[in-house]
Image (tube, grey):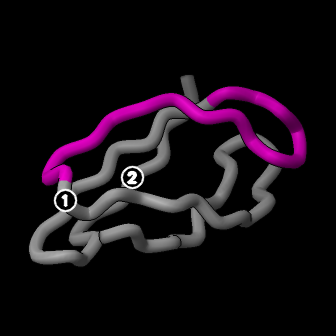
Amino acid sequence: MQLTEQVQCPFCGQCFELEFDTTVPNQRFTTDCEICCRPFEISVQCESGEVMALDVHPE
């Protein structure tokens, strides 16, 4: 199941949406901000089709 969550860039502060596959319990990946293009790391914990924890870390 795919869910969309708001994330905030740790550099420019802009919020945008990312889609997560909630069938994968623990995820960690790098993405680029849609506004300032700087990369940052996302950590997501999912359970039963829900996002339980979402953390954003500057690289």
Percent position of residue 12, x then y: 82, 48
The residue drawn where x is 55% and y is 22% is 59
- Front residue of 54/11: it is 54
Percent position of residue 5, x then y: 51, 71
Reply yes or no: does residue 19 show up in magenta.
no
Where 28 sits versus 50, above or below?
above
Q: Amino acid at mark 2?
A: Asp
The residue drawn where x is 68% and y is 50% is 9
The residue drawn where x is 44% and y is 42% is 42
Q: Amino acid at mark 1?
A: Thr
Q: Is 8 left or right of 21, judged from the image as shown?
A: right
The residue drawn where x is 76% and y is 29% is 38
Q: Quadrant of residue 2?
A: bottom left
Q: Residues within 10 Å of mark 1 (few under 14, many from 20)?
A: few
- Front residue of 54/10: it is 54
Where 55 sits versus 49, above or below?
above
Q: Which residue, as the protein is rendered here, is positioned at the far right?
A: 35
- Front residue of 12/45: it is 45
Q: Is 43 left or right of 7, judged from the image as shown?
A: left
Disc 2 to disc 1, how far (Cα)? Answer: 18 Å
Quarter occupied by the N terminus: bottom left
Q: Secondary structure at mark 1?
A: loop
Q: Which residue, as the protein is rendered here, is positioned at the far front?
A: 1
Instruction: Tell me, for residue 55, which label it has, or none.
Output: 2
Q: Which residue, as the protein is rendered here, is positioned at the far top?
A: 59
Reply yes or no: does residue 25 show up in magenta.
yes
Which residue is identified by label 1?
23
Q: Quadrant of residue 16?
A: bottom right
Where 34 sits versus 21, above or below?
above
Percent position of residue 45, x then y: 21, 56
Which segment did they paint magenta?
24-39
